[in-house]
Image: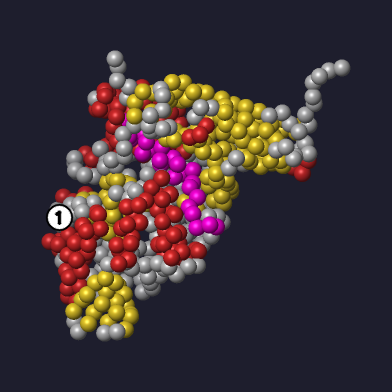
Amino acid sequence: MSDTIAYPFTLNFRLTSPLTKVLPNDIARNFPVYERATALRGDRVYFGGVADIIGHVKANSFRAMIHVDSELAPYLTVYAVENVPVRMAHYYRYCDGDYVGHTPGLYPDLLRKTDSVFLNQGLAQQLYFELNVPKRFPAGKYPVTVTLSPAQNHPTHAAPVSATLEIEVLAATIPTQDFTYTRWFHYDSLAAYYNVPVFSKRHWEIVENFVKMAVKNGINALLTPIFTPPLDTEVGSERLTVQLVDVLLEKGTYVFGFDKLKRFCKMAKRCGIKVLEIAHLFTQWGAEHAPKVMATVDGEYKRLFGWETDATDPEYVRFLRTMLPALKEKLDEYGYRDHYFFHISDEPSEKHLENYKAARDSVIDIIGDHPVRDALSHYEFYEQGIVSAPIPGVNKADEFVAHNVPDLWTYYACYPVHTYTNDFIAMNAHRTRVIGTQMYRAGIVGFLHWGYNFYFNRLSRNLINPYLTTDGEGSWPAGDPFSVYPANDGTAIPSLRAALFEQALFDMRAMRLAEAVSGKEAVTQEIDRYGKLDFAHYPKTPDYLIELRERINRMCVKQK
């Protein structure tokens, strides 16, 4: 009699590159096997996995348990990659070939911590693994074996299946992040989604939960709503008030209260925020008006300034010139001396030049001792001295780099959808991660994005369900409005895109160490191995980034 046991179905599983995106109709065995990787001490390393089943399964699905066997296992987090609906992968007719798909469907994005996964016949399931290497972990080679096996209570049995990745921890410690990264935090979005009053105890708890995840994602600068940020708001309408500075106007005299700002700064410090990003002092797309400012005026709480107020209205200018010195004094007192910057207006164009300049000139003598940064892509604005710290889009950044603009940031938002990097859900993973290498190569020191947790549609008209609507009701390419999902318990759930940007930041940190050990020119030569890399040109293959990071890691180890 044969001792062989016949199983009614086969479980397939393999480990994959961290630059893999698995669609539901993919097949596990078609993905290249990921067998070896290196890591620095203090590094954060990701890798993927893909599983599917062949054969008949009772009830068409079963639960597989996930077990990790390794000395590194205590530092490993396992995520199931959940697919989300994508209606608009990119703007119609504006795309290129560097996407995993162009049509509506289900795409991988949401990362949910797990110790098991449900497998369905005919559907591939992606896993994602996050390894946080301790700073003093011994150098050496460590096998990481991941095993999937049917849950014990499942009526149908199948053979467990394992895959192993060898991770070599190198004798070098990755440096801390010295790069400034912000994604705009929308406080009203959280109040609206969770249906809690702004700045209630529960709202503060939820805000802190989301800030903690932001810091984990590498975000270290936080949009600070001294007034309700004048962003993505329809002209004449207003968003829910999220104003940290209390304003009292009695008999023509302004008095300010900073209790909420103090609490905010304590929370930000507690979470690890290094820099405060003061919300814009004038409205978006032109600097034509004042933001909404609420105040108690002779005993009545009401809107003091808003769409009805011209940007250079004498009373608004008087208000700003009274408030800003007091604000700066409190920011210094609350622990952020020399660690905050200002905005005038978001994305002004050439036709707004006069408005922007007039708004800036009304306050620059007060705030000009700190960086004044704005997202704009017209080099002429910088050349004429109208803005001293520009943040051009990635599709315009190369011009600023060519002119050696110091302290340069970059951003993307909505666009670009072709040629350049971005982090839309439907884009290939390497296209999102390559921005770290691009920014290091260009000497960029900061990055901005408009949507960390924007759960509204265009111009904030309606609240959306981000689990069902990832494009702001057709307003932007899917994924652009947010990089985290709101959990039922008031915490933030990360996305695959957020993890890819984390990897980009860790790439930059490793390159900085390699530069210190081997020199800038050596690092640049490795980056340009297949041709000079800039924002408009990058290799369209995941192998480039994987191989580059391996070489950079080796360069970080001092030769004896």
Left or right: 289 with respect to 497? left
- Residue sitting at 17 percent across and 70 percent down? 322
Question: In the picture, which quadrant includes the C terminus?
Answer: top left
Task: Indicate the amino acid at tag 1.
Answer: Asp
x and y, in percent, of residue 339 in the image: 23, 51
Looking at the rendering, the stretch of residues picked out in magenta corresponds to 488-511
Name of the residue lying farthest toward the top:
560
* Snapshot quadrant of residue 439: top left
Please state which of residues 549 and 129 is positioned toward the viewer in this rendering. Answer: 129
Vertical arrangement, residue 158 with respect to residue 84, above or below? above
Q: How many marks?
A: 1
- Residue sitting at 46 percent across and 21 percent down? 141
Say which element carries label 1. Answer: loop
Q: Is residue 497 magenta?
A: yes
x and y, in percent, of residue 93 in the image: 47, 49
User: Which residue has dot 1 on it?
Assistant: 369
x and y, in percent, of residue 209 in the image: 44, 54
Residue 423 in view? yes
- Residue sitting at 26 percent across and 28 percent down? 515
What crowding class fits label 1: few (fewer than 14 Cα within 10 Å), some (14-19), or many (20 or more)? few
